[in-house]
Amino acid sequence: MIDVNELRKGVTFTMDGELYKVLEYKHHKPGRGKATIRTTLRNLRTGATIQHNFISADRVQDIRVERTTVQYLYRDGDMYYFMDTDTYDQTALHTTALEGQMEYLKEGMSVVLSTYEGEAIDVELPTTVDMKVTDSEVAIAGDTATGAMKKVTVETGLQVQVPLFVAVGDVIRVDTRDGSYVTRV
């Protein structure tokens, strides 16, 4: 058991028989009364995102999650397949477990797979991913005082705001935490 004051972004725990991962965490101390911990949680089995407030004295059951480096292979319908590069074992994850991460997956890339009691529950992406621009808005650089931006589509279908000089065929680096443009590669 861990105290809810120890919860941070990325911590996985069980509550009411379900597995949850903390997406956002905020400690709130009102002028009077007990402190509360406001969290945004994702159910790792159903993919549902919920808001939950804990009282400062609450405790939750922490779990031991095994992490292994795997390679993303391919997508087949609603299932994404990964292969352990050491044992060549393949693991499938449903789209609900990859909520918000699917646009960053490229065939052959290495990711960290989290498993709990033999069940694959989550994938950790690298901080940045290099992607090729496949489509771009037409943008003309004019008399702008600040950095003008345009929207481009990369090879996985993700849309990213980039500076005007980025063209179709360029490879850009995208931050997987917020989907922002980092640099042209």
Image: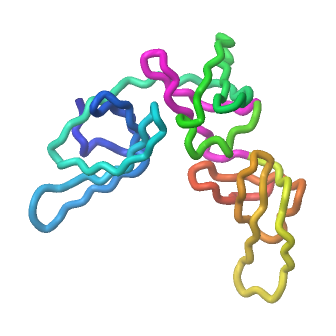
The residue positioned 72% from the left and 28% from the top of the image is 76
The residue positioned 45% from the left and 31% from the top of the image is 45
**From the viewer's perspective, is residue 52 above or below residue 79?**
below
Q: Is residue 36 magenta?
A: no
**From the viewer's perspective, is residue 135 above or below residue 20?**
below
Q: Nearer the viewer, residue 57 or 51?
A: 51
Q: Position of residue 117 (x, y in %)?
A: 43, 16
Tell me the colour scheme of the image. rainbow
Where residue 151 sits, quadrant-wise, is: bottom right
Q: Along the horizontal axis of the image, is 131 left or right of 50?
A: right
Q: Quadrant of the N terminus?
A: top left
Q: Position of residue 121 (x, y in %)?
A: 49, 28
The residue positioned 40% from the left and 51% from the top of the image is 24
Q: Position of residue 141 (x, y in %)?
A: 84, 80
The residue positioned 55% from the left and 42% from the top of the image is 99
Q: Which residues are magenta?
A: 108-129
